[in-house]
Amino acid sequence: MVDNRINLQINPDTRPPRTDEYSVGVDREVGRRVAAAIAYVRKDGANFIGWTDVGGQYREDMRTVAGRSVPVFSLINTTADRRFLLTNQDSYSMTYNGLVTVLERRRANGWQAFGSYTFSRVYGLQPSSGTTAAGAQVSTVAPPPGPQGISFGRDPNDLTNARGRLANDRPHVFRVLGGVDVPRTGLVVAANLQYFSGKPWAASAVVAVPQNNQQRILLEAPGSRRLSSQTLLDVRVSRTFLFSGLGRIELLLDVLNVLSDKAEEGLLTDNLSSKNFAQPIAFVDPRRAMLSVRVSLG
């Protein structure tokens, strides 16, 4: 007979999580209208709060899952002996390194432009480290960060291969924005081009252990796989009509995702044994156009 009672405890001496951040950068004027900047950013987080089992006793076994040999932890006492403690986890951490470069051309002679490129890496172990490809990176046990919900860490199998790239890790982010006045037409054309690396994820499996016959376990570290990168181009064309003493009317035509990028944003399952493994379930919004009118009186 399985005892389904859950025994939860909170450590009264829990320390608040902390994040230390510093950056160093250089700005430079290049001529009268061009500015350039480069900056290095570092973040280190610790004292993150999560669950651990302080009552259960486990034996480490090796299982062959989906053709891979992985360690699993099997409970050797009873489920009634498990005690889930919410407290600081020494193994939880977050490290971010980022290099940001910016180039800006201020508006003059009817045009302006801005560009930036960020190369970064965010790595560690958080309560959200067991999340899926579409999941968000959070540093708290609530709201539910993934398939395990707020229970991540209660079972030691949750932590297998869980250290790696965090869910918001996008190594390459490139942005270019610009606007130009079309001579003798009154039209203004603006564009925003963005490129993002795909979000990280990892293959998983479901194993049967004494404490749970549907225990999810990561087969590889997060970031071993990535969703497709995204290249998004949005364009706006505008024209303003002035009416002396009455006000003005502005016509706006926005075309979003001009390139019709079809990158996936979520997967049906990351279970390597499933026939639906890595099948996309959510996508970038398709190309669409919107026409709007703004009226200003007075």
Image (tube, rainbow, N blue to C red):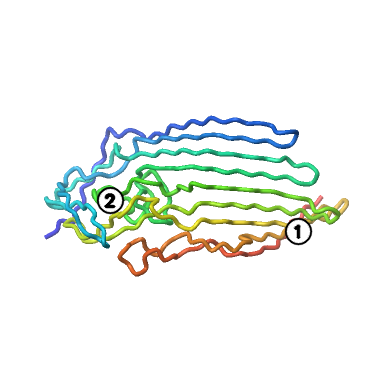
Q: Looking at the image, tell me whether mark 1 or mark 2 is earlier in sequence order.
A: 2
- In the figure, is residue 127 to the left or right of 114? left
Q: Residue at x 38, y 50 (%)?
A: 143
Task: Please state the horizontal and vertical placement of residue 237, each as a whole percent of the image.
Answer: 73, 57
Amino acid at the residue labelled 1: Leu
Residue 156's label in the rendered image is none
Q: Depth check: give the residue in front, 1 or 121.
A: 121
Circles 1 and 2: CB distance less than 8 Å? no
**SS under mark 1:** strand
Residue 251's label in the rendered image is 1
Q: Residue at x 26, y 40 (%)?
A: 10
Q: Depth check: give the residue in front, 69 or 43.
A: 69
- In the figure, is residue 97 to the left or right of 243? left
**SS under mark 2:** helix
Task: Please state the horizontal and vertical placement of residue 174, each as a whole percent of the image.
Answer: 57, 48
Task: Please state the horizontal and vertical placement of residue 259, each as a whole percent of the image.
Answer: 61, 61
Q: Is residue 203 above or below residue 94?
A: below
Q: Disc count in the image?
A: 2
Task: Please state the horizontal and vertical placement of residue 91, each as a whole percent of the image.
Answer: 30, 39
Amino acid at the residue labelled 2: Asp
Q: Which residue is mark 2?
A: 158
Q: Depth check: give the residue in front, 206 or 155.
A: 206
